[in-house]
Amino acid sequence: MVAAALAATLVAVAGCTVDQSPPPATGTPASPTSSAPAPSSPASSTADSPSPTVAATIAGTPQPVATGMEAPWSVVFRDGVPLVSERNSGRILELAADGSARSIGTVDGVAARGEAGLLGLAVGNGGDLFVYSTAEDGNRVQRFPVTGTRGSLSLGQPRTLLDGIPAAGNHDGGRIAFGPDGMLYVTTGDAGRRDDAQDRDALAGKILRMTPEGTVPAGNPFPGSLVYSYGHRNPQGIAWADDGTMFATEFGQNTWDELNIITAGSNYGWPTVEGIADRDGFVDPVQQWQPGSASPSGMAHSGGTLFIANLRGQVLRSVPVSDPSTSGEHFGREFGRLRDVTVAPDGKLWLVTNNTDGRGSPRQGDDRILAVPLG
């Protein structure tokens, strides 16, 4: 079954290179507001197809793609080949059709501690691999050429696009993804420096937007700055709906975890507010959950639905883009902690467990990548 699940994905053509818990709680979302009109989102201006009226749904039972992984954090597809980052080892793995994994290289200088280490991956249009990782002097974004063919891929020498992002044993952000505008978006945590989230001159507690070369792109809301939005505590998931609307997940402190709609130049409140606060100058989340039932990490979009991997909540959530104040739950505590979720080239949803990261209770076969069909 493992070989069949992965083989079906590998033969598909990739569409683009681009704790015991209380019950979940949500609040009525307030309309996003800010003290001044935010610049238009470049992502929104480039997309012209409306979101589907019928949202994608879970349509089957998850099947194992790969097992026995060590704290996997992110999975992406390069020309249909799945690549996985391991947080603590610093390795980037290539998955074969039989579910086996081989290292295509180790990211030098990774300082893994707590939540820090080798984190997010993204694939550029030319096939280069973009990597977010923690070094001794902070978090960084690097660009790696990848050579070879399926089964023999190799990681080349990196070019550092951005370094010195504040790092700590927690709150490191780490998700990176290319938006529909071709720009690279990077989530950074506050690294325990709470006030930095409100300081637009600091890199912590932000969502950054850069060109694939690491420069400030036209259309960024603050001249000469990579900062796209601010006032974040620890965002770890970003995704775009078909109409270009950008969403982000965020870990709260002790009160509310969040799902936000991201617009250029907006302030999301941390550490002044957490969750839906209805305060002038801050954008409220469109949905919130108690941390014990959530801790939302990776997020993916397919067919008008956002799928969110949750760590403490040990659940996959589905959120219809047409009504993002609502959500459904799937596989509650069935697979343990879920770190990431992505859509494979064959249209299946891949789930990444994170039970070997030091905070979970490993089960047989952990950590695993699972594939589930969507309908």
Image (spheres, grey):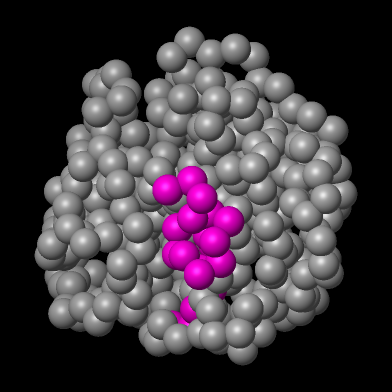
Specify start and end residues of the magenta stretch as a single range.
Answer: 193-212
Q: Quadrant of the C terminus?
A: top right
Residue sitting at x 12%, y 65%: 108
Q: Is residue 204 left or right of residue 96?
A: right
Residue 271 visible in the shown view: yes
Q: Is residue 148 above or below residue 64?
A: below
Residue sitting at x 40%, y 87%: 213
Q: Is residue 319 above or below residue 27?
A: below
Q: Quadrant of the N terminus?
A: top left
Q: Is residue 211 magenta?
A: yes
**Toward the viewer: 249 or 167?**
167
Q: Is residue 39 above or below residue 348?
A: below
Q: Write down the quadrant of residue 245 in the picture.
A: bottom right
Q: Position of residue 229 (x, y in %)?
A: 62, 63
Q: Is residue 246 left or right of residue 292?
A: right
Q: Position of residue 202 (x, y in %)?
A: 46, 65
